[in-house]
């Protein structure tokens, strides 16, 4: 009786003590001692029998448990509501319980690859970890809990336990809930003033009626409700299911509305800001939709900005930004900028990292405004290319430019508290010459001509973004016209601005409008020197050879797309890539060019150009960059140039294929509209 050994020993101790007491009692009274001895014998006999009985009961219980334990464990494992799979690292089954057959529909044999049975079941990405995920198979949802099996035996094959259960009911309910979420959409005719200009009341009414019909048909087709709130603005309410349908169609309503033209053959374009309700209030939802609309308009219009879960997706953006015919906004911004400058003690002007001529020229123009007000001003520079180095040498020794330039790495905490920072030719925080400077102040002004991206400098005092403008230098030139009546530009200031316009317009061949030539004429009257500009643009022999090598390495793809690369790490890599991308556009039939170059040991740069038909900004945003419809770029860290180049080709070909497909549909629609007319 091993289990009762301890109890019997305890009873023995008690019986011995009692026997000793009886022995002592014997010396005092023999009769009482004899009675006690009889009682002790009875007690000892009872205790022994009791322990023996408990031992027999335990032995029976122990034998029953051992005999049935395997059956009970097997029943418990097989009767669980979850399917259990033991798999190895390759995802091959080593053991399963019977529930797997119920979920799969047939028995799963040992060493079966589960990806053949459930393609959505993943093993390698979660190997060795604990967690859960949900996958879908044939309209059913399965939740998987995965956990590695820790084996005490050394050298044994590592295994993982997967606990799978059908959660289709819950997932279908959750999806139904998500599909019914409220979607708020703000829509605006972004070129309304230009479209209705010089039209009769009848023509204007007919055009707006056609736009209303297209939007109303689109809204009804997606189960929504539309209300016109102004001549050029609409509010649409949808459910998430209708939004998903519209996203799947790439918002084809933009193309249908673009087919509508006024008597001057100017197409109508729409911009949309869309927000999906999550846990925010309706007020926050409206703010998100308005922010999306502002973002779409800031990117040039004719596109949709969809905010889902804090992330923004863009659709459309194929039409060119329309140049405004008046400078009313430029005059208002110039006066506002003057007031901001007058209230500041120290002003810093900076552009993007690795400045180009447009960035440098715009900075020089803004610095001229500050010097006109006799304010302390500095232009913050990062790495300059050869052309900008030449221009800096021209300014050397001239008193009015003394201490004008500072290097980004030389800026310290000695900067005056809360200075005014004016950012030109970019609006993305991490691309500026000195991002730390933005953290030192809450007074920031942004002047840019690139289409607005999702990443934007936080809380600027003033924003002046005109995607239809040829360059930031053009915008700054217009601001100089209205900044002060007695504004007189020096020859060097005018030449810096003129060089910026020349570079970004490719010698006035790309993205030029009436206001571009007006700005150039103003700068020429102020003394801008084209001969000096040509001198600045001259390159050395090594750069010329490297440019020829990039051109020789190019490859032409169907659809008018040329791609090339410069794998060598050289000082003017970005300039060579930009010049190569520009030169490729002069090839017959080419619509877009992209050149990849090694910016540094860990960074690959991309320089993209377009004739205007395709939007290279959309492609560069895929790689974390941005820019303009015709000129854009990106920087990718931590990847090899060959891998990035392969992705560039794939993304560009998909974009061209989709664009050409949509354009053919649009052209057929226009022909049908013309036949009906």
Image (cartoon, grey):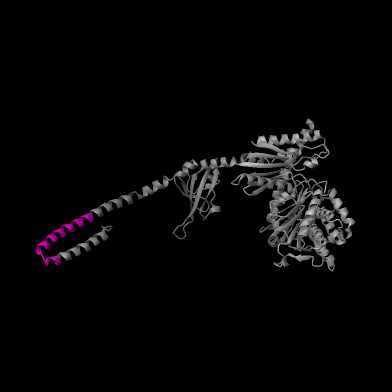
In the rendered view of the protein, which quadrant contains the C terminus? top right
* Res 459 → quadrant: bottom right
From this viewpoint, is residue 596 visible?
no
Q: Nearer the viewer, residue 185 or 471?
A: 185
From this viewpoint, is residue 58 visible?
yes
Considering every residue shown, the one lying at the far bottom of the view is: 397
Coordinates of residue 102 in the picture (x, y in percent): 47, 41
* Rendered position, 261 above or below 473: above
Number of marks in picture = 0
**Magenta residues, dominant SS class:** helix
Q: Nearer the viewer, residue 496 or 189?
A: 189
In the rendered view of the protein, which quadrant contains the N terminus? bottom left
* Res 245 → quadrant: top right
The residue shown at (64%, 39%) is 238
Considering every residue shown, the one lying at the far top of the view is: 676
Considering every residue shown, the one lying at the far left of the view is: 31
* Res 553 → quadrant: bottom right
The residue shown at (83%, 61%) is 372
Coordinates of residue 593 in the picture (x, y in percent): 76, 51
Query: Which region shows up in magenta?
Result: 23-51
Q: Residue 28: within the magenta?
A: yes
Q: Residue 654: within the magenta?
A: no
Coordinates of residue 356 in the picture (x, y in percent): 78, 59
Coordinates of residue 426 in the picture (x, y in percent): 74, 55
């Amino acid at each position: 009786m091993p289990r009762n050994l301890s109890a019997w020993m305890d009873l023995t101790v008690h019986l011995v003590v009692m026997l000793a007491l009886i022995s002592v009692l014997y010396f005092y009274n023999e009769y009482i001692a004899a009675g006690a001895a009889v009682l002790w014998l009875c007690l000892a006999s009872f205790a022994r029998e009791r322990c023996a009985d408990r031992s027999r009961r335990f032995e029976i219980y122990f034998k029953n448990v051992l005999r049935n334990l395997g059956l009970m464990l097997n029943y418990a494992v097989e009767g669980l509501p979850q399917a259990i799979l033991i798999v190895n690292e390759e995802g091959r089954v080593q053991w399963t319980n019977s529930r797997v057959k119920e979920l799969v529909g047939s028995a799963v044999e040992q060493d079966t690859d589960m990806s053949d049975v459930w393609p959505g079941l993943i093993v390698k990405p979660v190997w060795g970890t604990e967690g859960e995920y949900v996958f879908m198979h044939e309209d059913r949802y399965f939740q998987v809990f995965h956990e590695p099996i820790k084996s005490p035996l050394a050298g044994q094959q590592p295994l993982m336990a997967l606990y799978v259960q059908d959660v289709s009911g819950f997932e279908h309910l959750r999806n139904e809930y998500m599909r019914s979420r409220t979607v708020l959409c703000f829509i605006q005719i972004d070129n309304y003033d230009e479209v209705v200009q010089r039209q009769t009341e009848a023509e204007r009414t007919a055009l707006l009626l056609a736009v209303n019909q297209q939007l109303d048909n689109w809204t009804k087709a997606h189960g929504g409700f539309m209300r016109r709130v102004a001549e050029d603005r609409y509010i649409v309410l949808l459910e998430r299911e209708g939004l998903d349908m519209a996203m799947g169609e790439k918002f084809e309503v933009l193309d249908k509305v673009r087919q509508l033209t006024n008597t001057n053959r100017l197409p109508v374009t729409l911009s949309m800001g869309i927000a999906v309700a999550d846990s925010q209030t309706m007020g926050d939802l409206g703010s998100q939709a308005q922010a999306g609309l502002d973002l779409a308009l800031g990117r040039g219009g004719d596109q949709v900005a969809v905010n889902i879960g804090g992330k923004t997706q863009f659709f459309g953006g194929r039409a060119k930004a329309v140049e405004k015919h008046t400078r009313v906004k430029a005059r208002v911004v110039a006066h506002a900028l003057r007031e901001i400058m007058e209230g500041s003690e120290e002003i810093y002007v900076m552009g993007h990292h690795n400045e180009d001529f447009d960035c440098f020229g715009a900075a020089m123009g803004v610095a001229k405004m500050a010097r006109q007000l006799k304010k302390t001003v500095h232009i913050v520079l990062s790495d300059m290319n050869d052309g900008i180095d030449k221009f800096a040498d021209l300014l050397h020794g001239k008193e009015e430019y003394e201490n004008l330039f500072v290097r980004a790495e030389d800026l310290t905490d000695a900067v005056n508290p809360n200075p005014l920072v004016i950012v030109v030719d970019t609006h993305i925080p991490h691309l500026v010459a000195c991002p730390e400077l933005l953290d030192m102040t809450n007074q920031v002004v942004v002047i840019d001509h690139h289409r607005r991206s999702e990443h934007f400098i936080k809380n600027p005092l003033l924003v002046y973004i005109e995607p239809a403008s040829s360059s930031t230098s053009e915008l700054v030139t217009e601001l100089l016209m209205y900044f002060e009546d007695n504004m007189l530009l020096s020859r060097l200031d005018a030449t810096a601005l003129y060089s910026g316009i020349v570079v970004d317009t490719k010698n006035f061949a790309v993205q030029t409008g009436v206001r571009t030539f007006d700005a150039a004429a103003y700068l020429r009257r102020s003394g801008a020197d084209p001969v000096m500009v040509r001198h600045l643009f001259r390159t050395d022999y090594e750069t010329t050879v490297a440019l020829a090598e990039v051109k020789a390495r190019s490859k032409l793809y169907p659809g008018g797309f040329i791609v090339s690369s410069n794998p060598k790490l050289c000082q003017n890599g970005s300039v060579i890539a930009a010049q190569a991308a520009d030169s490729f556009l002069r090839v017959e039939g080419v619509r877009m060019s992209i050149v990849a170059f090694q910016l540094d040991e860990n960074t690959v740069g991309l320089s993209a150009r377009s004739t205007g038909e395709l939007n290279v900004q959309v492609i560069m945003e895929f790689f974390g960059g941005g820019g303009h419809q015709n000129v854009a770029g990106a920087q990718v860290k931590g990847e090899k140039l060959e891998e990035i180049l392969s992705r560039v080709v794939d993304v560009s070909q998909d974009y061209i294929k989709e664009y050409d497909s949509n354009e053919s549909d649009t052209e057929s629609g226009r022909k049908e509209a013309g036949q009906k007319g």
